[in-house]
Amino acid sequence: MVKMPKDIHDIIIIGGGIAAHTAALYTSRASLNPLVISGHEPDQLSLTSEVENFPGFPKGILGPELVKNAKEQAQRFGAKYTEGYVDSFKKLKGYFEVWVEKTKYKARTVIIATGASARRLKIPGEDKYFGRGVSTCAVCDAALFKNKGVVVIGGGDSAMEETLALYKFAKKVTIIHRKDSFKASKIMQDRVLKLKDRVNVIFDTIVTEVLGEQFVTGVKVKNVNTNKESIINCNGVFLAIGHIPNTKMFENVVKLDKLGYIITDKRSRTNIEGVYAAGDCQDPIFRQAITSAGTACQAAIEAERYIEHLKATRNYK
């Protein structure tokens, strides 16, 4: 029989969004008694106003409500939750050690679902109107701006993708980029620039403030060459300046790509046996609630099978 430390969990799930709650739901229903360690700050979905593209909600659902429901569903089957920031993550002989603000937790397996944070401009009005006109996901929110004017901030492929998603609904899309040319791939630029009927591009310009009353009414901009300021009226502001995966605490243990996203295979497995990743921390492409839940389901099932294998072959208890 393999001797294990006392108070060891079968599984620890790190994160507080839809991926973490989905993994908690599946592993708790498998009687693995998961411990979920979530941060103090809200996840991306909890900052979203109305979610209209998650299956099963024909009238839509508020992002915070969807996250809350998923958590309660996992708790119903026995998932336990604690809050705190992960300070360190170590692989030891036969188990993993997670330190959370001076408290040590041990687990046979770990699912990382820490998400990614959208880059912010950190300008006046940005936080105030987030979810009330300011967004980081056109695929999620484009339909809310039908026949309205919107601004997209950025110059990379993400900005082009946001523009294409918004073009289907918005009356006018204005792209604002701080440089004199886009850094997006040529094919993406071509797709956007040919939409001259409803897409306008403003180069050499930065947004200095988001304006509004109850919701966004416009943005204040400044030309970086002349310093001339002006106001652009709009109903929506879409930030497309990139995302930062919340993975720094794992960089010395699991393999990351050049942007910091956790590298997984098709079964949500990392390069470390017994460690899985799900959601936006390993997905630089789709970043949707439904894909986060899907990869979390995969990770949970793989973790369950791994634990069964451990108990069968190594005589764990």
Image (cartoon, rainbow, N blue to C red):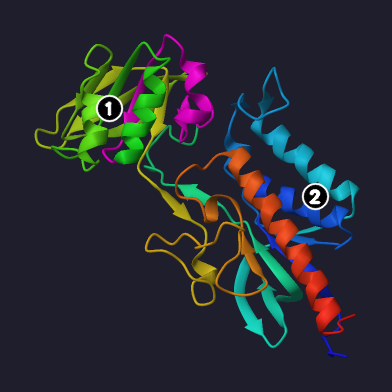
Tally the numbered discs: 2
Calculate the distance from the C-alpha at mark 1 to the C-alpha at mark 2.
41 Å
The disc, 1 or 2, on the residue closer to the chain's N-terminal end is 2
Q: Which quadrant would residue 98 be assigned to in this image?
A: bottom right
| Residue matched to label 2 | 25
**Label placed on residue 28:** none
> What residue sits 47% from the left and 33% below the top?
137
Residue 155, horizontal then vertical, whole percent:
26, 38
Can residue 102 be seen in the rendering of this structure? no
Which image quarter: residue 240?
Answer: top left
Q: Nearer the viewer, residue 148 or 214?
A: 148
- Check disc 1 and report the residue beneath it: 175
Q: Which of the two marks, 1 or 2, is nearer to us in this view?
A: 2
Write the start and end of the magenta stretch as one range. Answer: 129-156
**In which quadrant of the rendered image does the N terminus lie?**
bottom right
Q: Is residue 149 magenta?
A: yes
Specify whether 112 is left or right of 181.
right
